Image (spheres, grey):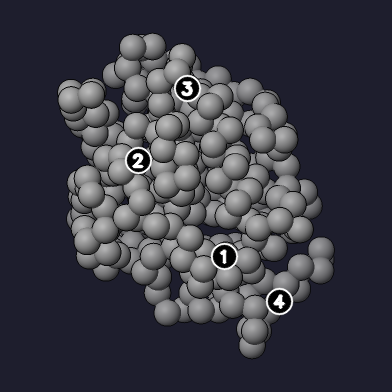
Amino acid sequence: MPPELTSRTATIAGVDTRTVTADGDPDRPHLLFLHGFSDSADGWRRVQRRLGKAGIGSTAVDQPAHGRAGPLDPDRGVVDQFVEFAAAAAREAMVGDRPIVVVGNSLGGAHALLLAQHHPELVSGVVAISPASFDHPRWFGVLDRDGVQSRVGRDGVAMPRRVGRVVMGPALRAVAFGRPWRAPSGFVTDWRAHFADPHRGPGLRQLSLRVAEEYFHADPVDLRAIRQPVLALWGTRDRLTLISSRQQFEDEIADLTFIPLRGIGHMPQLEVPGLTTKYLLRFVDQLASAPA
């Protein structure tokens, strides 16, 4: 029987949010999952159930402005707020005083790396799954504020036309998955609902306009500063964060395992949850067997 996942409301770093947890062996590492842009904690459920069967406990969180979480503060830097939130979530997820293994996809992958960079005492290992803030396709330039043709929704918040087509329409399935037919049933409908929601939509649109400024141009992740073991999982058909980032990772991370996922796209936790879980379990076992 698959382990039960428990959804709870919580306040983390002053943000009202939701956690999805799976119990595990308290003597084994606990994992913290950080989702990508416009996703939610629900995107990790398939992996969490598989890990739970293997005795690995985990916590997935709705990051600020996503899922059921409260908004970001428009007067503060986005990166700073996400790192502060991730650090508080890590402290909440820790079993005793044992550091967690942080796992992030896309924007959440950048946050996982940033957490290890700024709060190494909280993290025993990092799994970066197609992390944002490195090599991206040229069309990501439409995220810049200047000279962008945008469409304005009913809430008055502008979004670049091409971004709107991708994140709010069926094109998302083709862009996010190496083989689009592997997208879970209802995937596009659920993601479109995030933007249509009057409480979440405006915050996501505002965030999309700040991503280029604070992630792509500011280059916040310092890979050389990360001393923990890092597992990088990257789909060879990822059309959103490009696997050409591999060279930078291999040049700058001291303890790196880089695994290309053949034929897989941007969200392997949804496209191939079994394969993703296999590599997570292998990484956790490596951490447990490493010298203190």
Mark 2 element type: strand
Helix, strand or loop under label 3? loop
Q: How far apart, in angstroms, are the residues tagged by discs 2 and 3?
A: 15 Å
* Mark linked to residue 151: 4
At which x and y percent is residue 254? 23, 49
Q: Is residue 146 visible?
A: yes
Disc 2 to disc 1, C-alpha distance: 22 Å
Question: In which quadrant is the N terminus drawn?
Answer: top left
Earlier-in-chain disc, 4 versus 2 = 2
Nearer to us in this view, 80 or 266: 80
Q: Is residue 28 above or below residue 109?
A: above
Local secondary structure at mark 1: helix
Which amino acid lies under the numbered mark 3 shown in the image of this protein? Met
Q: Is residue 144 left or right of residue 216?
A: right
Residue 94, numbered circle: 3
Residue 191, percent across and down? 58, 52
Instruction: Say which amino acid is labelled 1.
Output: Glu
Q: Residues within 10 Å of mark 2 (few under 14, many from 20)?
A: many
Residue 12 is drawn in which quadrant? Answer: top right
Residue 91 location in percent, x, y? 53, 27
In this rendering, position of residue 207 left or right of residue 232 = right
Q: Is residue 217 left or right of residue 285?
A: right
The reply to whether dot 1 and dot 3 touch (C-beta < 8 Å) is: no
**How far separated are the C-alphas under marks 4 and 2?**
37 Å
Would you name the residue on which mark 2 appears? Answer: 126
Q: Earlier in the sequence, mark 1 or mark 3?
A: 3
